Image: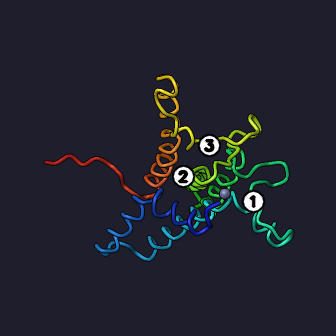
């Protein structure tokens, strides 16, 4: 597994890159108030913790069992879509406490979900050990290995479907993050030249 700091940096600097860019621009233009800074810190903290959530059992196992096994809580794999609901709920709970508005809490929940999924994405690229579809399918699936399919080794339809699915899964995480950020105060839109 990549180290925790890699997961956090990957989420903040790559998946949340538009937000980081917008923050830097706002700082240079001196348009960032103290309240804005607190909100952004909260946002990135929730995202960072959610990006580490799938490996939480490693902390318990390190203290109790002197190992860093990190993929299971009881019978439930932590690197799965099922377990990702905890990130969604965690983000929503934090959003309700911070904002007191259900709508904003949902967006923060989605942001946390994107952070969680970015962890699976990185682990997938590293060792491909994610049981995404538990309990429907109990074996690990590697989205990244789909990218390695070659043509004409595989037939054209198979090749195109696997290429599309592998890239779509990654784009989906980025889109969730962008959508949540756009609803939480960051602006992304096309501006036509006049
Ligand atoms: Zn992991």
| Residue 116 location (% of width, % of height) | 61, 54
Marks 1 and 2, how far apart in space? 28 Å
Marks 3 and 2, how far apart in space? 28 Å
Which residue is at a point 42% across and 60% down the rendered structure image? 17
| Residue 97 location (% of width, % of height) | 63, 63
Label 2: which secondary element: helix
- Looking at the image, tell me whether mark 3 or mark 2 is earlier in sequence order: 2
Q: In this view, does 64 lie above or below 184?
A: below
Label 3: which secondary element: loop
- Looking at the image, tell me whether mark 1 or mark 2 is earlier in sequence order: 1
Please identify the residue farthest to the left as the structure is shown. Answer: 194
Residue count near mark 1 (Cα–Cα under 10 Å), binned few <14, some 14–19, many ≥20:
some
Q: Is residue 144 above or below residue 67?
A: above
The label number, if any, that marks residue 70 in the structure image? 1
Which residue is at a point 48% across and 40% down the rendered structure image? 167
Instruction: Tell me the quadrant of the picture where the N terminus can be found.
Output: bottom right
| Residue 101 location (% of width, % of height) | 57, 56
Q: In this view, does 47 lie above or below 136?
A: below
Look at mark 3 in the image and give the residue it sits on: 142
Q: In this view, does 135 lie to the left or right of 185?
A: right
Q: Do the residues labelled 3 and 2 touch (CB within 8 Å)?
A: no
Quarter occupied by residue 144: top right
Q: Quadrant for ligand 1? A: bottom right
Marks 3 and 1, how far apart in space? 18 Å
**Can residue 105 be spotted in the picture?**
no
Please identify the residue farthest to the front as the structure is shown. Answer: 153
Tell me if the residue at label 1 has its CB under 8 Å from ligand 1.
yes
Which residue is at a point 47% across and 28% down the rendered structure image? 160
Label 1: which secondary element: loop
- Looking at the image, tell me whether mark 3 or mark 1 is earlier in sequence order: 1
The label number, if any, that marks residue 107 in the structure image? 2
């Amino acid at each position: 597994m990549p180290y925790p700091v890699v997961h956090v940096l990957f989420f903040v600097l790559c998946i949340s890159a538009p937000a980081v860019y917008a923050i830097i621009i706002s700082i240079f233009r001196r348009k960032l108030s103290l309240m804005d800074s607190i909100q952004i810190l909260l946002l990135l903290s929730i995202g960072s913790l959610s990006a580490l959530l799938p490996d939480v059992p490693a902390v318990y196992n390190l203290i109790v069992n002197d190992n860093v096994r990190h993929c299971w809580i009881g019978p439930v794999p932590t690197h799965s879509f099922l377990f990702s609901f905890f990130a969604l709920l965690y983000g929503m709970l934090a959003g309700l406490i911070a904002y007191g508005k259900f709508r904003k809490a949902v967006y923060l929940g989605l942001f946390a979900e994107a952070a969680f999924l970015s962890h699976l994405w990185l682990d997938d690229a590293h060792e491909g050990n994610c049981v995404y579809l538990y309990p429907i399918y109990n074996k690990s699936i590697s989205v990244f290995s789909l990218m390695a399919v070659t043509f004409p080794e595989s037939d054209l339809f198979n090749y195109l479907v696997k290429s599309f699915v592998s890239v779509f899964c990654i784009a989906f995480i980025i889109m969730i993050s962008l959508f949540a950020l756009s609803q939480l105060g960051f602006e992304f839109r096309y501006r036509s030249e006049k």
